[in-house]
Image (spheres, coloured by chain):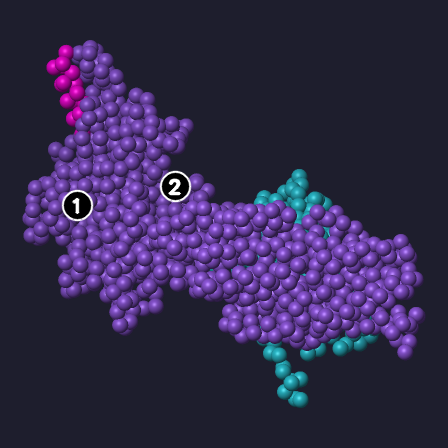
């Protein structure tokens, strides 16, 4: 097995987090004088023969920062393993929302459920709760955008969004943020709407979109060959954490997305230099309906 | 039909018939085909009206004057009621009781009742003007209205009576009203609030009513009834194709300068008007003249009402238009006079009304004039209510108008084609299009529901059951979706059928001839899907022959109420229609039909099996059960069961036991509970079924339900029932940690005393031995526990109860993990049980876990992991939380045996969490101790100490085993921190404590720890002795994996100071 490079240096100095240099004299904009300029060093996570074992075997998500954009997270729930920080959006003077630290509580339950599921897959992933659903299980578009922008700028590795807006007026801003996240190596895992309607950001190509399958296995997920939904994960009758240390069984694509978020955290923990496009490929290659166990070991003997 | 009388109609052709007619004057069909009195459940509106203070007035006035006044009051009330389609059921003193919808239901019966009441109040007011002048008195009335289900009994003469709660409620509401007020109930309010102004009043405490009754006061303001006024309430979804067809028809009309017709057909609420509104609003009002008129179900001047609507809403006002026409020559003046007469007619007398032909001509003339400047679109709404005269006039326009661009849009329910099958085929030359508005697809319904219900900007993606249910159940009907969501919003409860939908469907059913309604009634009892064979057999029992039945079904299919879905299968097009038909059948009739169906199914099931489907037995049970429930509702005092009840109960028990063996506990509990309801209370099987149901709940980790399901009455002998229930309750409380073992032991002694005289009572004894087995298990006395379970097994076999037998065998096998049974013997038992339970994954899992643990102890780690993998594979099909937790515990143990202490620690922690969530603090504490132990094994002595400190706070929930594990670990930690000498005695007493159990491995572990602590304290002799004891215990169990460790320990101790036996 190849040894994985460890993420090194100041994350803020990663090339993908710097403002882009879009002009070199003598070269068309956005280009680079590769003939003369010394090639910049950057770390690479090599992709070998992708199997589920290669992708996340033995990984517990440690070292990966996950933001849960939701209703808040009850940090005292036994199913929520590592909650590092809790913030929430609050309306400011001029229709703008600001992000401030808050208590690790969850009045609605939805965020705790999602966080518990992520913990169940990647127990060592460091979770941060970003409360954008300020009114129980719903919130405002401006609040969502502020929370998402904050999470992208904070440099989270994975953002779980088990929510969406059906209002077209927020589509463009969300689209721009999703692209920004993608380029900054911040993976957005977004759940599809539960009803056959259009909403955002899950149908964007720059996010990983997840809907439900009807099996009761948290480890099984499928690639969906017919977009816009990328993957199907467990989302029906899922036992989820609920505030007050309780558990309930609940259904919704909300609960499929955290499964994939957890798997992403485990993959990135093991292969920290994967780009979002590589990560989606790895997810694809290791999906239950794509990955074919070779059986080579036994067949060749 | 002349408005305002309860009219007899012909069941075949719907023609009006005289009150006493026995045959239809139009088609000759018999009227009242049932021949006698008909009883039906009906949704009606009841109106009560009373004079206030009439006793005082009667005293004041001369009886003759009073009689005159009373007569005038009754006339006023009656004329108002009749004008709105109601019927006076009776006069009681000065009070009037009227019913709306008794013989024929209308979807707006509540509205009619409210309008009738308003009109009556107004008429009494007019009456007062004269009375004050002539008699110096003033009459005041008050009204109460209530809508709901009643039984309506209609005599062949057309006389009727209604019986039901709404009658009483309406009377009480009337009493509660102030003079001049109209109070209505919640159901009526729901149906009229879109049209009539209402104010809520405080819920009324009414005489004879347990709960306060919510009521609304009619404020009398009529809100705009026309849906085409005001902003669009809902978006238009999924009608692009229909809109395009309307535009195409309009293009053809304007291009060819001709008259065209589009008939927009569809169910109420499907979105016909909404579509047409979107279409006409797309035009510039200056370039196209749009005229809209709406037909009414009843009222004065009804024939030309839609035309009057059009003229009154004339762009710029009709008076101006009429003036303009009158200046245009003789013909124009004639047309203007004629049409003005129609406009005035609704307000004034009908004396000057022009003839039918004249009006038709005038309309054509007007259109021809209008068409010279702009194309005209005429929208005729609700044309199914149109009088045939109006339909003739519209068809006349198509035939006679030429060279004018006029598009006639006729909006109607499909009933229009029943009344006039040739509609739309009037003139070959004119383009005619029938546009049927189909229900929305599920996707479109979902989009609509999301648009209506989801006002917020951002939503969490947790399933919204209400929205999904509405999208699924609204039948693709936007109005239904909207009304259902309204009901949810107002009552914050589950989705129920809103009264207005129910009213529409009831009205539709009421319009059907008797034979069709009868067929639907029978079909509705069978279900939404019904087989032709079943229906035919049922109809034959009602003297309806085969060909007749086919003909009726064909008619219903043409009406789009039912559809043939296979050679032998039909289904209701709308499930709501099925539900309504079912609900409208009187309960006694439903009971009778359910029993008839059950009898038929019994014949099929008993027959040669060729005609029987696998679902039939369950269907048989369902019909018997439903009949029984209806019987209980109708005759609560009647304890007798239907004839087929025993049969149905057997079927349910059979299905329930199958579910139980599959470990489908919720299914089993439900089926067995249903079976109990069909068995006499004295039946022998009641007791066992009750115990199984309680077991199901216990296995579902719901101890409260398990205890609640215990019913001492299930045994004919009450003392016996109470004893067995007390035993099972104690078992549940013991296993859940709800009662302390000492307390249960005391109770067990009492049970034993009570059981002394009951040697033959296998059921109770079997449960008693289980309780004792559990008690010993909790005390870690495993050999004794096995002995009790074996006694329980004997009892289970004696009573031939294979369910209990399997349960006991499983328990005995599981106990082999801890009991003094050797690993080899335990594994042999596991092999036997695996074979026995091979087909039953759920029972197999504990066996496999036992096998894994034993194999691990015996040193066969691969065998252990293989058994675990198999257990997990079975679990993925099941939903057993507790089993998940147990699998994890055994996995951790195998990992620990394999030396993978970090993995084992994490698994034990998860185990601890799972048990906490399942409400099992005692087990959670045990796993917490194991996890601390695994920390220590990783060399994390400090962390292990902290973990142990946390555990110490939970000593009250610790059992003996956990205490031994924790104490031994505590001694090891202290010893590792250099305080070995101080804790040797403590370690020794811990080892002694472990002797209280008969778990050889636990004993071995304690002695092994003592050996190490003693060695660290420099007490080599004590250490060697302890190590030898540990080895001895491990070997007795056959735990070779652990024995190897003990031997190694012994060898190390021997190097320092060789034990005596190895000197030679």
Q: In which quarter of the image is residue B119?
A: top left
Q: Earlier in the sequence, mark 1 or mark 2?
A: 1
| Residue B711 lies in the magenta stretch | no
Residue on which disc 2 sits? B230
Chain corresponding to cyan in the figure: A
Tell me the tag on residue B38. 1
For label 1, count other residues whose C-alpha is less than 10 Å away and answer few (under 14), some (14-19) or many (20+).
Answer: some
Q: Which residue is drawn at 43% across and 46% down?
A: B718
**Residue B133 x %, y %:** 20, 12
Q: For this rendering, which residue is in front, B226 or B451? A: B451
Q: For this rendering, which residue is in front, B849 or B1001? A: B1001
Q: For this rendering, which residue is in front, B387 or B675? A: B675
Residue B470 in the figure: left or right of residue B412: right
- Can residue B466 be seen by looking at this rendering? yes
**The residue tagged with tag 2: helix, strand or loop?**
loop
Position of the N terminus of chain B, as image quadrant, is top left
Q: What stretch is highlighted in magenta?
A: B62-78
Chain corresponding to purple in the figure: B
Q: Which residue is drawn at 42% across and 60% down?
A: B656
Label count reads 2
**The residue tagged with tag 1: helix, strand or loop?**
strand
Q: Which residue is drawn at 90% across and 65% down?
A: B1020
């Amino acid at each position: 097995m190849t040894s994985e490079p460890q993420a090194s240096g100041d994350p803020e100095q990663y090339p993908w987090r710097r403002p882009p240099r879009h002009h070199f004299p003598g070269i068309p904009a956005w280009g680079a004088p590769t003939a003369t300029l010394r090639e910049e060093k950057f770390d690479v996570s090599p992709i070998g023969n992708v199997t589920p074992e290669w992708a996340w075997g033995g990984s517990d998500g440690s070292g990966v920062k996950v933001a849960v954009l939701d209703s808040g997270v009850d940090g005292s729930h036994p199913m929520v393993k590592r909650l590092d920080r809790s913030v929430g959006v609050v309306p400011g003077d001029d229709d703008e929302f600001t992000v401030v630290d808050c208590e690790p509580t969850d009045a609605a339950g939805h965020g705790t459920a999602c966080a518990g599921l992520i913990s169940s897959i990647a127990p060592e992933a460091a979770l941060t709760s970003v409360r954008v659903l300020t009114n129980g299980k719903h919130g405002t578009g401006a609040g969502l955008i502020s929370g998402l922008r904050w999470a992208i700028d904070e440099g989270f590795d994975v953002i779980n969004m088990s929510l969406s807006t059906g209002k077209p007026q927020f589509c463009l801003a969300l689209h721009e943020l999703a692209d920004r996240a993608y380029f900054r190596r911040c993976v957005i895992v977004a759940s599809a709407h539960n009803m056959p309607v259009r909403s955002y950001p899950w149908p964007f190509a720059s996010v990983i979109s997840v809907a439900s399958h009807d099996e009761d296995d948290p480890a099984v997920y499928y690639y969906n060959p017919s977009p816009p939904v990328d993957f199907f994960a467990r989302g029906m009758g899922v036992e989820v954490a609920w505030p007050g240390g309780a558990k309930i069984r609940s259904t919704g694509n909300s609960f499929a997305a955290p499964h994939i978020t957890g798997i992403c955290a485990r993959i990135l923990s093991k292969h920290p230099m994967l780009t979002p496009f590589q990560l989606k490929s790895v997810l694809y290659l290791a999906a239950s309906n794509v990955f074919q166990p070779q059986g080579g070991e036994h067949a060749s003997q | 039909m002349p408005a305002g009388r309860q009219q007899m109609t012909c069941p075949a052709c719907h023609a009006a018939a005289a009150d006493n007619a026995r045959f239809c004057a139009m088609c000759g069909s018999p009227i009242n085909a049932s021949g006698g009195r008909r009883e039906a459940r009906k949704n009606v509106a009841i109106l009560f009206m009373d004079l206030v203070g009439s006793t005082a007035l009667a005293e004041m006035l001369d009886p003759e004057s009073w009689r005159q006044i009373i007569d005038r009051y009754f006339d006023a009330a009656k004329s108002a009621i009749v004008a709105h389609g109601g019927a006076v059921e009776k006069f009681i003193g000065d009070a009037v009781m009227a019913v709306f919808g008794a013989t024929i239901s209308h979807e707006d019966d509540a509205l009619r009742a409210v309008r009738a009441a308003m009109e009556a109040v107004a008429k009494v007011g007019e009456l007062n003007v004269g009375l004050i002048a002539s008699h110096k008195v003033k009459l005041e009335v008050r009204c109460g209205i209530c809508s709901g289900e009643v039984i309506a009994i209609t005599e062949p003469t057309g006389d009727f009576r209604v019986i039901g709660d709404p009658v009483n409620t309406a009377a009480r509401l009337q009493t509660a009203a102030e003079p001049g007020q109209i109070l209505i109930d919640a159901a009526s309010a729901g149906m009229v609030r879109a049209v009539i102004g209402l104010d809520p009043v405080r819920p009324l405490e009414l005489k004879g009513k347990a709960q306060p009754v919510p009521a609304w006061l009619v404020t009398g303001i009529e809100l705009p009834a026309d849906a085409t006024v005001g902003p669009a309430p809902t978006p238009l979804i999924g009608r692009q194709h229909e809109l395009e067809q309307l535009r195409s028809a309009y293009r053809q009309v304007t291009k060819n300068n001709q008259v065209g017709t589009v008939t927009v057909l569809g169910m109420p609420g499907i979105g016909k008007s909404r579509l047409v509104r979107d279409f006409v609003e797309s035009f510039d009002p200056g370039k196209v003249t749009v005229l809209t008129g709406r037909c009414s179900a009843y009222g004065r001047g009804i024939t030309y009402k839609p035309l009057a609507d059009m003229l009154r809403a004339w762009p710029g006002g009709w008076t101006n238009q009429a003036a303009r026409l009158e200046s245009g020559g003789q013909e124009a003046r004639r047309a203007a006079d004629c049409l003005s007469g129609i406009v005035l007619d609704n307000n004034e007398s009908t004396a000057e009304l022009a003839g039918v032909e004249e009006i038709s001509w005038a309309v054509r003339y007007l259109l021809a004039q209008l068409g010279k400047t702009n194309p005209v679109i005429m929208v005729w709404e609700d044309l199914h209510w149109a009088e045939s005269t109006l339909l003739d006039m519209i068809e006349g326009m198509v035939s006679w108008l030429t060279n004018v661009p006029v598009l006639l849009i006729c909006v109607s329910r499909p009933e229009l084609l029943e009344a006039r099958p040739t509609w739309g085929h009037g003139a070959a030359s004119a383009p005619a299009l029938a546009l049927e508005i189909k229900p929305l697809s599920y996707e479109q319904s979902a989009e609509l529901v999301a648009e209506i219900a989801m006002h917020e900007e951002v939503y969490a993606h947790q399933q919204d059951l209400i929205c999904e249910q509405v999208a699924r159940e609204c039948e693709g009907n936007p109005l239904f979706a909207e009304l259902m969501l309204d009901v949810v919003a107002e009552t914050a409860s589950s989705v129920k059928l809103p009264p207005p939908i129910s009213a529409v469907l009831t009205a539709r059913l009421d319009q059907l001839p008797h034979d069709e309604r009868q067929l639907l009634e029978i079909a509705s009892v069978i279900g939404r899907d019904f087989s032709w064979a079943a229906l035919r057999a049922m109809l034959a029992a009602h003297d309806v022959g085969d060909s007749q039945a086919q003909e009726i079904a064909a008619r219903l299919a043409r009406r789009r109420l039912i559809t043939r879905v296979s050679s032998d299968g039909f289904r209701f097009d709308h499930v709501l229609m099925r539900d309504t038909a079912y609900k409208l059948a009187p309960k006694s009739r439903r009971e009778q039909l359910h029993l008839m169906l059950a009898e038929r199914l019994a014949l099929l099931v008993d027959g040669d099996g060729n005609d029987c489907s696998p679902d039939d037995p369950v269907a048989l049970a369902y019909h018997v059960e439903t009949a029984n429930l209806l019987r209980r509702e109708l005759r609560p005092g009647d304890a007798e069961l239907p004839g087929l009840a025993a049969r149905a109960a057997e079927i349910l028990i059979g299905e329930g036991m199958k579910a139980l063996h599959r470990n489908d506990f919720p299914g089993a509990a439900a089926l067995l509970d249903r079976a109990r309801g069909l068995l006499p209370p004295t039946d022998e099987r009641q007791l066992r079924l009750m115990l199984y149901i309680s077991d199901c709940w216990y296995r579902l980790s719901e101890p409260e339900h398990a205890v609640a399901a215990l019913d001492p009455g299930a045994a004919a002998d009450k003392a016996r029932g109470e004893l067995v229930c007390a035993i099972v309750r104690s078992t549940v409380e013991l296993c859940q940690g709800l009662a302390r073992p000492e307390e249960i032991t005391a109770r067990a002694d009492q049970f034993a005393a009570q059981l002394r005289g009951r040697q033959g009572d296998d059921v109770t004894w079997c449960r008693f031995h289980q309780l004792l087995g559990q008690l010993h298990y909790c005390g870690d006395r495993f050999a004794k526990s096995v002995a009790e379970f074996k006694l329980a097994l004997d009892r289970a076999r004696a009573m031939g109860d294979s369910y209990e037998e399997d349960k006991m065998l499983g328990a005995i096998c599981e106990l082999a993990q801890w009991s003094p049974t050797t690993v080899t013997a335990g594994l042999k038992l596991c092999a036997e049980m695996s074979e026995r339970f091979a087909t039953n994954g759920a029972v197999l899992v504990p066996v496999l876990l036992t096998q894994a643990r034993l194999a691990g102890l015996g040193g066969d780690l691969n065998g252990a992991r293989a058994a675990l993998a198999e257990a997990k594979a079975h679990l993925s099909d099941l939903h057993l939380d507790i089993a998940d937790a147990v699998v994890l515990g055994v996995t951790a143990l195998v990992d620990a045996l394999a030396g993978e202490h970090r993995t084992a620690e994490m698994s034990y922690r998860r185990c601890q969490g799972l048990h906490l969530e399942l409400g099992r603090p005692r087990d959670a504490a045990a796993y917490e101790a194991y996890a601390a132990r695994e920390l220590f094994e990783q060399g994390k002595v400090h962390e292990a100490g902290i973990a142990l400190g946390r555990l110490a706070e939970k000593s009250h929930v610790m059992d003996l085993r956990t205490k031994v594990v924790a104490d031994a670990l505590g001694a090891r930690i202290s010893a590792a921190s250099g305080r070995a000498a101080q804790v040797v005695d403590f370690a020794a007493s811990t080892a002694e404590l472990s002797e209280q159990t008969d778990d050889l491995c636990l004993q071995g572990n304690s002695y092994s720890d003592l050996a190490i602590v003693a060695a660290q304290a420099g007490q080599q002799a004590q250490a060697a002795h302890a190590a030898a004891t540990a080895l001895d215990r491990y070997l007795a169990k056959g735990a070779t994996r652990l024995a190897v460790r003990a031997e190694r320990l012994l060898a190390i101790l021997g190097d320092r100071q060789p034990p005596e036996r190895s000197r030679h």
